[in-house]
C-alpha cells in the first residue's frame, strides 16, 4: 500500500519536507521508523502533536525503505486521506 501511495505521488520524504507538510496541514498520516534517531523522532512527533496529525511508529528503517523502493528512509508522510485511512487500518 505504501509503494502504491509513493508511486501515486501522495507521499513526502525527508525530514524537512515532512515538517513543512505537517505545518501546511497537507500530511494526513506520518509513519516513523522505530529506529529513528532521538532528535528526529522528537521533532516529528512534536510537530504531529502540535498540528493534530496522526502518526504511527512502524518497523525499522529497512522495512520502511523497502516498501517504497528508496534507501535509508526513517519517516514518510502520507498526503492523501484515502491512503492514510487504509494504511492506518492495515497497521492497526
Image: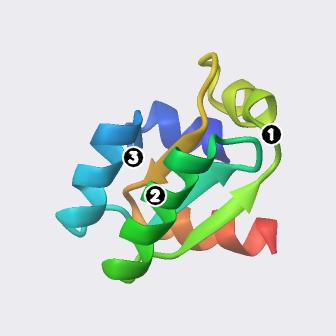
Give the residue pinned by disc 1.
60
Mark 1 or 3, closer to the camera: 1
Q: Residue at x 30, y 62 (%)?
A: 22
Instruction: Mark 3: give few (<14), some (14-19) or many (20+) Cα within 10 Å.
Output: some
Outermost residue, front direction? 39
**Left or right of 5, for residue 17:** left
Q: Sequence order check: which comes first, mark 3 or mark 2?
A: 3
Mark 3 or 2, closer to the camera: 2
Q: Are marks 1 and 3 in contact (CB under 8 Å)?
A: no
Q: Sequence order check: which comes first, mark 1 or mark 3?
A: 3
Please say whether residue 1 is visible from this viewpoint: yes
Give the residue pinned by disc 3.
10
The location of residue 18, given as percent across then percent down, is 35, 48
Quadrant of the image occupied by residue 14: top left
Q: Residue at x 81, y 75 (%)?
A: 92
The location of residue 71, given as percent across then percent down, is 63, 16
Q: Residue at x 60, y 55 (%)?
A: 31
Exactly how many numbered labels are in the figure?
3
Q: Residue at x 35, y 62 (%)?
A: 27
The vertical placement of 47 against 2, above or below, is below
Mark 2: secondary structure: helix
Instruction: Mark 2: give few (<14), some (14-19) or many (20+) Cα within 10 Å.
Output: many
Please say whether residue 26 is visible from this viewpoint: no
Mark 2 or 1, closer to the camera: 2
Of the pair 44 and 12, the residue shown nearer to us: 44
Distance of label 1 from label 3 (alpha carbons): 21 Å
The numbered disc on residue 44 is 2
Amino acid at each position: 500500500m505504501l509503494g502504491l501511495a509513493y508511486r501515486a505521488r501522495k507521499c513526502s520524504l525527508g525530514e524537512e519536507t515532512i515538517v513543512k507538510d505537517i505545518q501546511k496541514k497537507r500530511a494526513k498520516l506520518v509513519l516513523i521508523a522505530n529506529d529513528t534517531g532521538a532528535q528526529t523522532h522528537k521533532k516529528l512527533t512534536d510537530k504531529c502533536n502540535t498540528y493534530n496529525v496522526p502518526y504511527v511508529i512502524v518497523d525499522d528503517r529497512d522495512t520502511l525503505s523497502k516498501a517504497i523502493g528508496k534507501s535509508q528512509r526513517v519517516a514518510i508522510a502520507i498526503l492523501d486521506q484515502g491512503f492514510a485511512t487504509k494504511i492506518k487500518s492495515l497497521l492497526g
